[in-house]
Amino acid sequence: MFILKRVGCVGSIMVPQCTSLFVGNFSACHCLSSTKRHSPYSSVDIERYSSLVKAVMSSKVSSQTPENLQEEDEHIYGPVVKAQNPSSRSEVRVPKNLHPFLNCEETVETEEAESGPPARILLNRGKYRSPVPSVTRILQQTLSREQIFYLERWKRKMIAQLGEEGFQEYSQNLFRQGKLFHSTVEDTLISDATSMDKESSEKAEYQPDVQGYMESISHVLADVSAVRATESTVQHAELNYLGIMDCVARYRGVLCLIDWKTSEKPKPFLSNTFDNPIQVAAYAGALNSDGNYKYQVENGLIIVAYKDGSPAHAHQLSSELMLKYWSTWLLRLENFTEQSTSQASSSFVEKR
DNA sequence: GGATCCTTCTTCTTCTTC
């Protein structure tokens, strides 16, 4: 098989640059192309230029072959992760335990008093790792092979650019900005909820690092009302997981579980947000089963804020979408549980 | 004071033709 890579120009002669398989067999390649249509190659005096063609092909200008490209890729990005075959991909996996998203025993009570400061239930954990895993830990430990591959590749690229220390600094800075942004949003929401004069906070001065992000979400904040909870712990007793949700409030009149995000890249589509919708569904499902909250949520909202102040993207998750992501969450939870049990049993065997 | 936990982010691209 001959693979035509690109057409280069040498002097006034058009020379097809093929992979190494092509070298020394110009006529065969020529025949392939001439069967389709009359091309400029047909007028090339093959005998006369064969040495030139060989010289060009053996030069170091284009020494790439599929073999060394793969080698190079493996060196830079690690071994190739093969995509799933279409038949297995089309199979729709359904969680074994299709737990309801809404707690049917409780009535969906959303009309209760919505004034006063928002609830904030702090995480109260023991001294050592609790047997209840968190949403973040579960999502991190059940990433797909594809996600792990792209994340690792990105990390290697960044380290190549910034160096190990530079990358550490860069990551820490992203986390620091994210945390600062979250606490600033929370402060703003609490002060808006407790203050009668909402206008005053709209002209607030923020720390330079979050000024752009706050500007970015200003149009979203204008649509947020009746904040019921901020940075509050939710726990699903039956499914055994917990987490800290960002916010519950009305967005354009609809009660939503809101997750604030910062991003360097624009994320105009929900698909750009990776596992964020699953995270939101996981928190909402936990909240709906958690007796500390006297209401339930059926909708979600992911707000992606940008440092340059450009308008944040707001991805609203309808109740149908939330159910879809709830189902995905249940699968991830199942995977996590299976992993934990197999790890526990293997360490038990090792100890014995 | 030290250790631990939950978060905070990061991925989905690369060349052919006008």
Image (cartoon, helix red, strand yellow):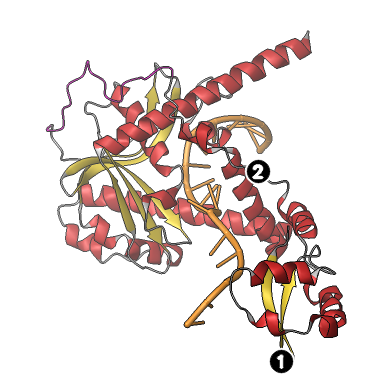
Residue placed under numbered mark 1 in the picture: A12
User: What is the x, y in percent for residue A341?
Assistant: 60, 16
Tell me what residue is drawn at x 57 percent, y 33 percent. A141
- Foreground of the two, A127 or A78: A78
Judge whether residue A265 is colored magenta. no
Per the rendering, the mark at residue A220 is none
Secondary structure at numbered mark 1? loop
Q: Is residue A162 visible?
A: yes
Q: Quadrant of the C terminus of chain A?
A: top right
Q: Which corner quadrant of the image does residue A244 belong to?
A: top left
Alpha carbon separation for disc pair 2 and 1: 43 Å
For image coordinates 68% across by 61% down, the residue present is A166
- Which SS type dominates the magenta stretch? loop
Residue A81 got which mark?
Answer: 2
* SS label for mark 2: loop
Q: Is residue A100 magenta?
A: yes
What chain letter is assigned to the residue under label 2? Answer: A
The extreme top residue here reads A352
Residue range (magenta): A96-111
Q: Nearer the viewer, residue A118 or A297?
A: A297
